């Protein structure tokens, strides 16, 4: 049985890691080698592309952290989850929902939606 919450938490562990060397191992663990990520404002392919996206979020929102909202849900090789991004210990400034396809238990094709963005 697939543990969808564990997959989502591995995703956020990679997105929340600020140290590039430590993040590489987390990206390798959470994302399939041919991963593709798309949302309305950014996109990235492969582990290097995902790392570049994560580094960009850290430079634009220093000190912000991603948190899982509720529980991840899924069936078969499909997963969906919602998240918040904001300063640690504070209300999320940005919120979204991601839908993904898994390959061998790792995220392979991710489509992100922004549910709440600052005005």
Image (spheres, rainbow, N blue to C red):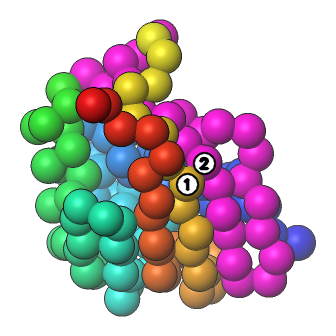
Residue 71, given in percent of the width and then of the height, sits at 76, 45
Query: Which residue extends farthest right?
Result: 1
Asked if marks 2 and 1 touch (Cβ < 8 Å), the reply is yes
Q: Quadrant of residue 47?
A: bottom left
Residue name at image x 27 percent, y 80 percent = 46
The residue pinned by badge 1 equals 97
- In magenta segment, residue 65: yes
First of labels 2, 1 by sequence position: 2
Residue name at image x 38 percent, y 81 percent = 35
For this view, does 108 lie left or right of residue 4? left
Q: Quadrant of residue 52?
A: bottom left
Residue 81, given in percent of the width and then of the height, sits at 64, 54
* Residue 51 is at least partly visible in this image: no
Q: Which residues are magenta?
A: 63-89
Q: Nearer the viewer, residue 31 or 60?
A: 60
- Distance between the alpha carbons at the discs numbered 2 and 1: 4 Å
* Residue 86 is at least partly visible in this image: yes
Residue 12, given in percent of the width and then of the height, sits at 48, 46
Q: Main secondary structure of the magenta part?
A: strand
Q: Secondary structure at mark 1?
A: strand
Q: Is residue 32 above or below residue 56?
A: below
For this view, does 57 lie left or right of residue 78? left
Q: Secondary structure at mark 2?
A: strand
> Dividing the image into 4 quarters, which one contains the C terminus?
top left
- In magenta segment, residue 76: yes
For this view, does 86 lie left or right of residue 91? left
Of the numbered discs in the image, which one, if any, rests on residue 82?
A: 2
């Amino acid at each position: 049985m697939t543990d969808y919450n564990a997959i989502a938490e591995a995703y956020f562990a990679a997105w929340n890691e600020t140290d590039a060397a430590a993040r590489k191992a987390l990206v390798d663990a959470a994302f399939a080698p041919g991963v593709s990520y798309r949302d309305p404002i950014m996109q990235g392919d492969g582990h290097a592309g995902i790392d570049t996206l994560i580094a960009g979020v850290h430079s634009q929102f220093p000190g912000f952290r991603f948190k899982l909202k509720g529980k991840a849900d899924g069936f078969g090789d499909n997963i969906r989850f919602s998240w918040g991004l904001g300063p640690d210990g504070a209300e999320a400034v940005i919120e979204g929902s991601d839908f993904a396809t898994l390959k061998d238990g790792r995220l392979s094709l991710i489509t992100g939606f922004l549910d709440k963005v600052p005005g």
